[in-house]
C-alpha cells in the first residue's frame, strides 16, 4: 500500500519558491495532508520516513527527451523501454514525456503503440518506473530550413488527417512540435487543438509576426528556444523574440552550455522568468560512453558528451534534468528554489498537467525527491512508492 508519512522535512513550496519545515501525509499515492508541524498519527498500513531536515522537492518532469541508456523511443523494444524508463526514475525524473523524432509514418505508429504499453506498465509498477505522461511528437512536420539533426527526406507539411490519426492513437497527454508556419490555412493546428493536445513551435523559420500570430492561435510553447529557429536579428526577431516577449508561451531551454551559451541562457531567464522550461532533449547516448549512435534517421557521433550528426548539426544532448537544474543556477545566479521550478511545475504547465504533477500540493501525485546534504538527489518517490 502506497501510504507514507514523511516527517521532519524542508518542503518545497512552488508558489512561494521557498522551503518550509513540515510533514507530508501520503494516502494511496496522493498527497493528503501538508503540515507546517508534525503529523502525529502515521498512515494505517503505511511507513514513516524521517527526512532529517533534508529538502524535499517535486519529482522532475522531462517533456522533451528522445531517449537515454542506449535506447531511442522510436526504435526501442519493450525490454529496452523498461530499462530506459528506470534510468529516468533513478535520475529523479518521475514524469517523462517520450519524444518521437522524425521517422516514416509506420515507425511512428509502432513507437506510439509501444509507448502506450510502457505507460500502462508504469502505472502498475509500484514506483519502479516513472509516470509516463503521454507522447511528444517532434517530427515530420518541420521546416527543412531549420531541420537540425532531422533527415530532410523524412519531413512533410503538417497534415490534419495524419495528425488526427496519430493523436488518436496516443494515450495520455499529447504534445506536438511543428513548424506551424507551413500549415496552410491553419487546419492542422486547429485539428491538434480540437483534440485536446498542446502545440509547440519548433524547427521553424517563422518570422516574428508569424510566430506571434501562431501563439495567438493557440501555440503554447517554443521547442528548444534559440535552437533550430532564426537567430535574433535587429530587423526581425523571429520566433525567439516572440517567445521572449510573450506573456503566455512557455520557452524550452536546453541548459547544457553547448546548445545555448551560458550568457544567452541568462538573457532568456531574465526575460522569461516563470515561463522558462528546462528540457534535456536527450538522446540514446545519455548515460553512455562516447561513440556512434543515431537520432531522427541520422547517424550521430558523441564526443566529450556532445552529440553531432556527421554533417556537424547538434543532435540532441546527453544532459540529465538535475544537471540542467544545476546549470541554470550556475549560468544565471538563480537560486535552487527558482531552478527547481523550471524543472517541475513549469514543464507540467507546458503540457497542461499542472493539476496532477509538478508541485507538492494536496491532491497531487506523491512524486517526490529527497535531496542529500550536498543538494544531490538522494531518495526518489513515485506515486507514493519509494524507488530507492
Image (cartoon, grey):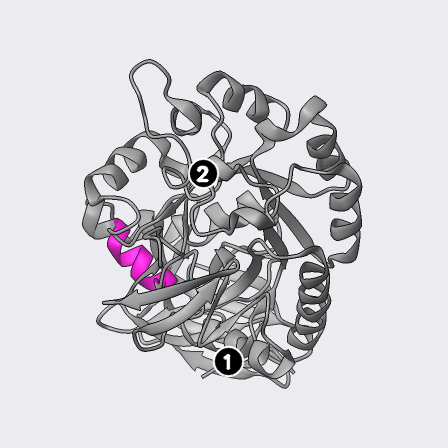
Q: Is residue 194 magenta?
A: no
Name the residue furthest top.
235
| Residue at 72% from the left image edge and 34% from the top image edge | 188
Q: Quadrant of the N terminus?
A: bottom right
Q: Residues within 10 Å of mark 2 (few under 14, many from 20)?
A: some
User: Does residue 82 lie above or below 311 as drawn?
Assistant: below
The answer to whether residue 183 is left or right of residue 341 is right
Residue for point 50% across, 32% down: 249
Q: Main secondary structure of the magenta part?
A: helix
Q: Which residues are magenta?
A: 319-328
Q: Position of residue 264 (x, y in %)?
A: 24, 37
Q: Position of residue 382 (x, y in %)?
A: 54, 72
Q: What SS does tag 2 mark?
A: helix
Residue 231, quarter of the rendered image: top left
Please state which of residues 4 and 64 is positioned toward the viewer in this rendering.
64
Taking 189 as reference, is 295 above or below it?
Answer: below
Nearer the observer: mark 2 or 1; the answer is 2
Q: Give the side of residue 123 with respect to residue 282, left or right.
A: right
Q: Position of residue 98 (x, y in %)?
A: 57, 61
Sooner in the amino-acid sequence: mark 2 or mark 1: 2
Q: Quadrant of residue 292?
A: bottom left
382 in relation to 225, above or below:
below
Secondary structure beneath dot 1 equals strand
**Residue located 52% across and 66% down the image:** 367
53 relative position to 58: left or right: left
User: To which residue does mark 1 refer?
Assistant: 386
Q: Give whichever of 352, 180 is nearer the camera.
A: 180
* Residue 15 marker: none
The disc placed on residue 146 is: 2
Looking at the rendered image, the quarter that the C terminus falls into is bottom left
In reply to whether residue 324 is colored magenta, the answer given is yes
Amino acid at each position: 500500500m502506497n501510504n507514507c508519512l514523511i516527517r521532519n522535512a524542508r518542503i518545497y513550496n512552488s508558489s512561494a519558491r521557498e522551503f518550509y519545515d513540515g510533514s507530508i501525509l501520503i494516502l494511496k499515492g496522493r498527497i493528503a495532508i501538508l503540515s507546517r508541524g508534525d503529523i502525529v498519527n502515521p498512515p494505517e498500513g503505511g511507513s514513516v520516513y524521517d527526512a532529517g531536515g533534508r529538502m524535499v522537492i517535486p519529482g522532475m518532469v522531462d517533456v522533451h527527451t528522445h531517449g537515454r541508456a542506449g535506447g531511442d523511443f522510436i526504435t526501442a523494444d519493450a525490454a529496452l523501454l523498461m530499462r530506459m524508463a528506470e534510468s529516468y526514475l533513478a535520475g529523479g525524473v518521475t514524469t517523462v514525456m517520450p519524444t518521437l523524432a522524425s521517422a516514416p509514418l509506420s515507425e511512428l505508429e509502432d513507437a506510439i503503440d509501444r509507448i502506450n504499453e510502457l505507460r500502462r506498465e508504469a502505472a502498475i509498477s509500484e514506483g519502479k518506473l516513472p509516470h509516463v505522461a503521454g507522447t511528444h511528437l517532434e517530427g515530420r512536420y518541420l521546416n527543412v530550413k531549420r531541420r537540425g539533426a532531422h533527415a530532410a527526406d523524412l519531413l512533410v507539411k503538417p497534415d490534419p488527417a495524419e495528425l488526427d490519426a496519430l493523436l488518436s492513437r496516443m494515450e495520455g497527454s499529447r504534445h506536438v512540435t511543428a513548424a506551424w508556419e507551413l500549415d496552410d490555412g491553419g487546419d492542422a493546428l486547429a485539428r491538434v487543438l480540437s483534440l485536446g493536445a498542446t502545440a509547440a513551435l519548433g524547427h521553424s523559420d517563422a518570422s516574428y509576426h508569424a510566430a506571434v500570430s501562431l501563439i495567438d492561435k493557440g501555440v503554447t510553447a517554443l521547442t528548444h528556444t534559440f535552437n533550430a529557429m532564426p537567430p535574433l536579428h535587429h530587423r526581425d526577431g523571429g520566433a525567439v523574440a516572440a517567445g521572449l516577449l510573450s506573456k503566455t508561451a512557455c520557452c524550452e531551454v536546453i541548459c547544457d552550455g553547448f546548445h545555448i551559451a551560458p550568457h544567452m541562457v541568462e538573457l532568456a531567464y531574465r526575460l522569461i522568468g516563470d515561463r522558462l522550461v528546462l528540457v534535456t532533449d536527450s538522446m540514446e547516448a545519455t548515460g553512455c560512453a562516447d561513440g556512434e549512435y543515431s537520432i531522427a534517421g541520422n547517424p550521430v557521433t558523441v564526443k566529450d558528451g556532445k552529440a553531432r550528426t556527421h554533417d556537424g548539426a547538434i543532435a540532441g544532448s546527453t544532459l540529465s534534468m538535475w544537471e540542467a537544474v544545476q546549470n541554470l543556477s550556475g549560468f544565471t545566479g538563480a537560486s535552487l528554489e527558482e531552478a527547481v521550478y523550471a524543472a517541475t511545475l513549469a514543464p507540467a504547465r507546458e503540457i497542461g498537467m499542472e493539476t496532477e504533477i509538478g508541485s507538492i500540493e494536496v491532491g497531487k501525485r506523491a512524486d517526490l525527491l529527497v535531496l542529500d546534504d550536498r543538494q544531490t538527489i538522494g531518495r526518489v518517490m513515485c506515486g507514493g512508492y519509494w524507488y530507492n
